[in-house]
Each structure stands twice: as structure tokens, then as C-alpha cells.
Amino acid sequence: MIECEGLVKIYKTDDLEVVALQGLNLSVKDGELMAIIGNSGSGKSTLLNILGGLDHPSAGSVHVGPWDLLKITEEQLVKYKRETVGFIWQNNARNLLPYLSALENVEMPMMLRGKVDRAYSRQLLEWVGLKERMNNKLHQLSGGEQQRVAIAISLSNRPQMLLADEPTGSVDSRTSDMIMDIFRTLNRELGLTIVIVTHDLSLAGKVDRVVAIRDGLTSTEFLRRNTHLDDAEGFGKGGLQEVHEAYAVVDRAGRLQVPKEYLSALGIAGKASMEFDGERIIITKPKLLEGEQK
């Protein structure tokens, strides 16, 4: 569904240049439920904005389904945002129109396309647990309820992919769990690809996969989820076994991304010694040659 290779995003002003993404590699399968984690400034929201068609990449390649987002025209971009991707912001003010009811908010994207499906709008609000609240105005809904309306809005045009920027960042833990349950149901029942950007490490056990981003690059830390997340016998009964595996990202040219802290711990700078023993590649600090100084 998503293929990014060497993705670069540079923001420029008259006297300043900021590299938000510096050669990021990422692959997301169709129908996957995943989270992207990282500290503030790591580039995760920039990546989400590019995937959502809200920002344009500077270099590299980024494909979503059949769309090449580096070469997409403005006309194609409108079609892409209307038909391929749904977007949820953490700030509800960006998701919702306060003077409309929950149902009218869900119908607004349909109205922009020229065809309102009221039955489907009602079904979406039922899916997110707001069957009895669909005619309420926003000031009559809690923050968690407003965020669930936002999820329904993002699905109103039947997108292939859902992008969520910190969707649980402004709600309590109970509501956060409810929202994540909704995402998992949508992923399982509709086969929807869902990418969630967050700084909350606790989400690692609630999605299929977690990819960490550091300094605008995909990290080697590739956290595997609970392998029995959908196992009714194990879920919530202590039967889950969390598995964490660390991977290094290898691009098509065979280049390997190794975290700086790993290299620093080994005292590696500039050059590294590599050996292949038939099964493993071993990276070590180069041995000093005779006459060389540390």
C-alpha cells in the first residue's frame, strides 16, 4: 500500500533550511494496522502529511497504491485525497465543524463530492458507538465522542487508507482503548490500511507493527506486536506473548542503516570492520594497523 524509499523533505525559508526527512525508507502492506513512533521533531508528522497529500516531498520516492506522490498533479491530488486517504488530526477543531450535528459532519465530505449517503453516514456513527448521539451538536459531545465522530468523517468517502495523527493524545486511557478497539475493528472488518502516528509506546501491543523514526530516518528498531492479538482465548487473559525483534533497514542499493548509539557504543566513527561467517554479518571497530594511532 505504501512504499517510501530515500524520502526527503526539506523546508526552506530565506535564511534557514530544515531537513525534516533525510532518506527515509518505509513499506506498509495493504490491510496492515501499524503505528509510527518517534519524539517531537523526528519527522513522523511530516511523513504523515506527505502520505495524506497535505505536503509535497522534496526528493526520493513515495507511492501509495497506484499513486506516485512525487509526480502527482494538483488535479490528481484532489482525487487522491477524496478517494484514497482519510485523515484524523489530534485537534478536533481541525476535524469538525462546530455548528453542525455529528451526522451532518459525517455527511459534509459526501456533499463536497455531490452525493450524500445518509444510511451509510448513520452506519458509520453506529460503528464508532454513537448511534444515540448522531443528532447532537458538538458542544453536546465529550472530547472522546468528538474524536469518534472524526473517525466516522474520515471514512465517509470509503478510503483505502486511514491516517491518524496522535488520535489518542487528548483523551483519557479508557477512551484511548475504545478508539484503538475501533481502529482494530475497522482494520479487521473492512480490510482498511491504518497508519497511526504517536509518541505513546503503550500502543505497541495494540497494532500489528510499530516502526520507530529518529532524526527523519526509519529506525532499526522495528517492534513486533503481540503475536496473538486477535486470539480470543489469549486477549486480556494473560495469554499474550509480546515479541520484540530489532531489524536494520536495508535499501535497494544494499545500504544498511545502523543507529548512531550502536556505533558510538563500539567506538566506530568513519570506518567499520565487517566479517561474514556464513550465517551472520559482524560489524566491529577496525583493528589498528601497525604504526597507526587511536
Image: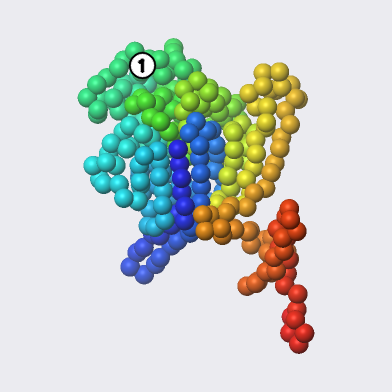
Along the line of sight, the residue nearer the viewer: 86 or 29: 29
Q: Left or right: 195 with respect to 172? A: left
Tag 1 residue = 120
Give the class, few, some or many, for how many residues have Cα within 10 Å of label 1's Cα (few <14, many ≥20). some
Give the residue at x 55% y 37%: 34
Q: Residue furthest right?
A: 290
| Residue 137 in view here | no
Q: Is residue 243 above or below residue 189?
A: below
Query: x, y (%) of residue 140?
Result: 41, 21
Coloration mode? rainbow
Q: Is residue 66 visible?
A: yes
Judging depth in this view, the residue of 168 and 258 nearest the camera is: 258
Q: Where, quadrant-wise, is the C terminus in this rendering?
A: bottom right
* SS state under label 1: helix
Question: Percent x, y for residue 205?
Answer: 65, 34
Judged from this view, the residue extending furthest toward the front is 278
Residue at (73, 53) in percent of width and height: 279
- Determine whether, in the image, residue 136 is placed left or right of residue 200: left
Residue lying at 40% horizontally and 45% vertically, measured from the top left = 63
Amino acid type shown at disc 1 = Tyr
In the rendering, at what x and y percent does residue 261 appear? 67, 61
Would you say 3 lies left or right of 206 here? Answer: left
Residue beneath the point at 47% across and 52% down: 5
Figure check: 243 above or below 152: below
- Relative to 110, 268 lies left or right: right
